[in-house]
DNA sequence: ATTATTCCTATTATTGAAGTAGGAGATAAA
DNA sequence: TTTATCTCCTACTTCAATAATAGGAATAAT
C-alpha cells in the first residue's frame, strides 16, 4: 500500500505549479523538475497524464509551459491523486464485483469500500491552495522572523 | 495504492479462523484454503508471517492446525494488515525522513502522515469479532427468514 | 533559421507480487 | 512402530508494474 513516484512527484509538481504560475505566466517543466529535484523527462510523462485529464493547460513552443486549468483552491488532492494513481480502490472488487467470487457476501469488501471512501474524504479536504499556504507557513517557521 | 493478495487473503483467512475455531479446536489450513478458495501453499506463507508475529498459535503434527492467540475482539484489522502489508506509510519518508531530501519542509509529507494515521484509525475501529458478526448479519439478510 | 519548449512512442532495468515445489520436522492415530 | 497428516522452511519461477531513459516530431517565439 504505497503511493508511487508518479503520484508523489506529480503532487509536488502541482503544488509547485500553483505557487509559481502567477497571472497566467506558464511555468517550464524544466524549472519544476529542477526545484523538485526530479527527472525532467519523467515529469513530462506525469504532465502528459495531467494534461490529458484537463487539470493543467499547456502552451507549446518556445516560452511555452504549463498552467493550472482551474483555480488552485478548486483543485483537490483527491483530483490529482486520482489522475495519477487511479481511483483509490484498495482492491479491484470494490469497483468491479466480478473481480472476486463471492463478492456479494464478502465482508472484507465492505471494509475496503469504507476505507477507500475515508481516504477520498481526507484527500478531498485539501486543495492545492491550502497546501501552498501550509508550505509557506512551514518555511516561515523554519526561517527566523524579525519584528520591528 | 492497492492491498496485495497477502493482505486480502490473510484477512479473510483470519476471519474464517475466528469463525471456525471454537473452544480451542485448531483449524486446518487446507480447510481455510478450500473455504476461501485460495492456494493452500500460498496460505502457508501467509500464516508463517502471522505465526511469527504471534497473532496465531500453531499446533503441529497430525490433527494440528491454527488457533487465534488472542480473543477475536482483541484483534484489530490494523494489527492483521500491519503484519501482512507492513505499517501503512503511504510513502517511505513518513517513517524514514532520510528517504526524501527536503523532508523537513515538504508539505506533502505531512499529508501522507495524516492520511496514514486516518487509515490506521479506521482499521483500528474493526476487530475480527465485529467482522464475523457483520458477516453473519449479511448472510442472514441474503437468505430468506422464516418467522413462526 | 534557430532555439526552446511541449508532445509522442519505444525501450530498458529493476523490483515486487503471486504463487509453486519439494521436502523436513512433529504428532496423533492405526 | 509405522503411517498418515499436519505445520514449517527454503528455494525457485513467473509475471506485471514501476521508474525511468531515449530520440525525435510538432509548435511557436526570436
Ligand atoms: S470480494 Fe474481493 S476481497 Fe472479498
Ligand atoms: S519528503 Fe517525501 S515526498 Fe516530500
Image (cartoon, coloured by chain):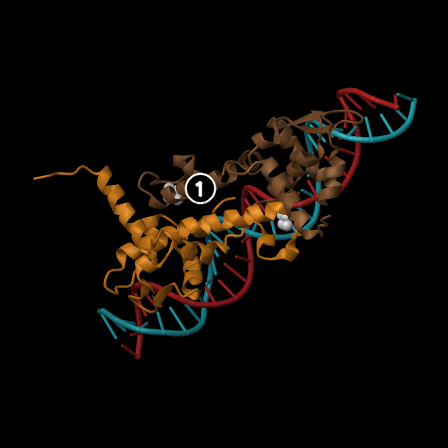
Chain colours: A brown, B orange, C cyan, D red
Q: How many marks?
A: 1
Give the image quarter of residue A99: top left
SS category of the residue bearing label 1: helix
Q: Position of residue C5 (x, y in %)?
A: 77, 30
Q: Position of residue A33 (x, y in %)?
A: 73, 40
Q: Is residue B72 above or below residue B112?
A: below
Q: Position of residue B146 (x, y in %)?
A: 12, 38
Q: Is residue C4 above or below residue B25?
A: above
Q: Position of residue B110 (x, y in %)?
A: 58, 48
Q: Residue at x 35, y 39 (%)?
A: A103
Q: Residue at x 80, y 26 (%)?
A: A62
Query: Viewed as shown, does residue A72 lie left or right of A78?
Result: right
Q: Residue at x 42, y 54 (%)?
A: B78
Q: Farthest residue to the front: give it.
A: A148
Q: Is residue A90 above or below residue B44?
A: above
Q: Residue at x 55, y 47 (%)?
A: B112
**Front-lying residue, A91 or B123:** B123
**Front-lying residue, D27 or A122:** A122
Circle 1: is it few (<14), some (14-19), or many (20+) Cα within 10 Å? some
**Image mark 1: chain:** A
Query: Viewed as shown, does residue B28 lie left or right of B112?
Result: left
What residue sits right under mark 1 in the picture? Answer: A118
**Front-lying residue, B46 or B145:** B145
Give the image quarter of residue A7: top right
Q: Farthest residue to the left: give it.
A: B148
Disc 1 residue: CB within 8 Å of ligand 1: no
Amino acid at each position: 500500500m504505497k503511493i508511487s513516484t508518479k503520484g508523489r512527484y506529480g503532487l509536488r509538481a502541482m503544488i509547485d505549479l500553483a505557487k509559481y504560475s502567477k497571472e497566467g505566466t506558464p511555468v517550464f517543466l524544466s524549472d519544476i523538475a529542477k526545484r523538485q529535484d526530479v527527472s525532467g523527462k519523467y515529469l513530462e510523462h506525469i504532465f502528459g497524464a495531467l494534461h490529458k485529464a484537463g487539470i493543467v493547460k499547456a502552451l507549446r513552443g518556445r516560452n511555452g509551459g504549463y498552467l493550472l486549468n482551474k483555480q488552485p483552491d478548486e483543485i483537490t488532492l483527491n483530483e490529482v491523486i486520482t489522475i495519477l494513481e487511479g481511483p483509490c480502490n484498495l482492491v479491484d472488487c470494490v469497483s468491479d464485483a466480478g473481480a472476486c467470487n463471492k463478492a456479494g457476501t464478502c465482508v472484507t469488501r465492505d471494509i475496503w469500500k469504507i476505507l477507500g471512501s475515508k481516504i477520498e474524504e481526507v484527500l478531498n479536504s485539501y486543495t492545492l491552495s491550502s497546501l501552498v499556504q501550509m508550505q509557506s507557513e512551514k518555511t516561515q517557521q523554519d526561517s527566523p522572523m524579525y519584528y520591528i
